[in-house]
Amino acid sequence: MSAPAMGTTKTAHSDVAPKKKRGPGALATAYLVIYNVVMTAGWLVIAVGLVRAYLARGSYHGLYYSIEKPLKFFQTGALLEVSGIVPSSVVLTGFQVLSRVFLTWAVTHSVREVQNEDSVLLFVSAWTITEIIRYSFYTFSLLNHLPYLVKWARYTFFLVLYPMGVTGELLTVYAALPYVQKTGLYSVTLPNKYNFSFDYHTFLILTMVSYIPLFPQLYFHMMRQRKKVLCHVEEYKTE
Amino acid sequence: MSRTTFFERNIGRITVEVLDGRTRQQLCFLDKVEPHATIGEIKSLFHKSYQQLYPARQDLKLDPKGKSLRDDDVLQNLPVGTTATIYFKDLGPQVGWTMVFLAEYLGPLFIYLLFYFRAPYIYSHQDVFTSSPYSVVTLACACHTCHYIKRLIEAIFVHRFSHGTMPLRTIVRNCVYYWAFSAWLAFYINHPLYTPPSYGDMQVNYALAIFVLCELGNFSIHVALNNLKAEGGPKCRRFPHPTKNPFTWLFFFVSCPNYTYEVGAWASFSVMTQCLPVALFTFLAFIQMTIWAKGKHKTYSREFKDYPQLRMPIIPLLL
């Protein structure tokens, strides 16, 4: 899912109550700044790649191939965020990153036939814009020089980008279903020595269904964070 | 009543006000409470005003962010003056431990049997109420069933619980987990396309032997722990020791041999059925029990200065 929910809880807290912030040590901060700068740059590369490919081809079709490698690299790189050094909920972060990595590798990469779908462009664009904003937000926060614009963007753009990303993701999974069923991709049938079976087709359907309870929760969580972060700042401004 | 009599009658009495932990609204006002009243009695009084909020559901604290008060805490021993302000939180519907275990164990017991007897709508139509040609499948059913019957017996007759209840939400979550997992593993073991173990009867018999030993071991430990509580009583805290029963000799090596035996039983069940879902269940159970064992081990080590150094939480010499 494309929600920038990672790092919101405690980072938002640190926006609201700076006195209570327990930041990481100097070395960890340096590591984090480098990490976030690299990630921002990476997603900018993907954004530029998409724009250039579009201008070169003149159509939205098949742009996935122009950014396939950096997408895989930088999205997978986000797994480092689950290490717990970044002060955000490990569960929420982990879940987010795993779902993104799952979509990148287990769906888009594995089912070649969906790579030409427009839905892929939809979620890739959503992810790209979200991640550029999110990683710059972290970078500036760590350097204690967060422009209001970046904070505002991080807590506002998701309103459109999140549903956009989710739509792209769901459409892509849906498009992959017939191919998975036909080829029996990643599926194990009975009988076998270990008495186990797994139907990837059913698994994908269940994944899609899981969006129904999960997406609203994450979306409303972000909305609440938005209210907390942006409204408090306005209070300080009026004083 | 004269002023002095009023004063004499109410000397030392405490006024208790109960506020909601979140809204700070006053929920209950109790005046002239005896200083030697316990929190448990306060909870009963509170219950009188709020029918739905029976004592087990009440979480009372002196500080909204602090530790919960125990039922046997005495009012005058707490840092309160003549007026005690207590913060309340609703723990939600609670269920007694015995009921909890009944729900958690009866489910897998019956669900497995549904699969063993191949009830309708599980497997294909021609397989309804048929039976497997393999003896290991019947054996597995016997083992699984005995395991849960043993657990039920323990829950009813052996265990003594320190806390009275568990929140409803937790039970629902636990039941879903146990019931779903037992359905999943029963599905494969009793499947018409089930493949018996690669090393045949030898594999099954060895695994069965270990399974039985682990079940006996687990039972012995539960009895030993129970006796410890019985002898000691709530105030006298002792840690468990090996007894004459050889199964309890595992106490020389681990703090929580009941968990060790439990993992052993499930591991041997996995080998006996050669079924990956069972192995997965065993693995997850092992992780959870290791977490519990480590916690228990830490508690023991901290509380008893003479706690044996050799003991590990769950796996002898290793973990």
Image: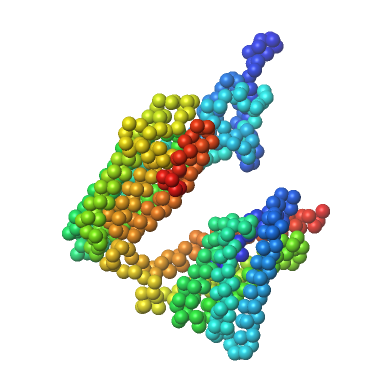
Q: Is A32 above or below relative to B76? A: below
Q: In this view, does B67 lie to the left or right of B109?
A: right
Between A10 and A23, which is closer to the camera in this rendering? Answer: A23
Between B224 and B150, which is closer to the camera in this rendering? Answer: B224
Q: How is the image coloured?
A: rainbow
Q: In this view, does A161 lie to the left or right of B259?
A: right
Task: Look at 55% across and 63% down and name the residue there.
Answer: A96
Task: Look at 39% across and 44% down and name the residue there.
Answer: B259
Q: Which residue of the protein is positioned furthest toward the bottom in this rendering?
A: A57
Quarter holding residue A137: bottom right
Place of residue B42 in the rendered image (x, y in percent of width and height, measured from the top left): 55, 27
Place of residue A82 in the rendered image (x, y in percent of width and height, measured from the top left): 57, 61
Place of residue A213 in the rendered image (x, y in percent of width and height, measured from the top left): 50, 60
Question: Is residue B315 in view?
Answer: yes
Where's the N terminus of chain B, which quadrant?
Answer: top right
Figure label count: 0
Q: Is B129 above or below relative to B317? A: below
Q: Which residue of the protein is positioned furthest toward the right in this rendering?
A: A239
Place of residue B257 in the rendered image (x, y in percent of width and height, measured from the top left): 39, 41
Between B9 and B270, which is closer to the camera in this rendering? Answer: B270
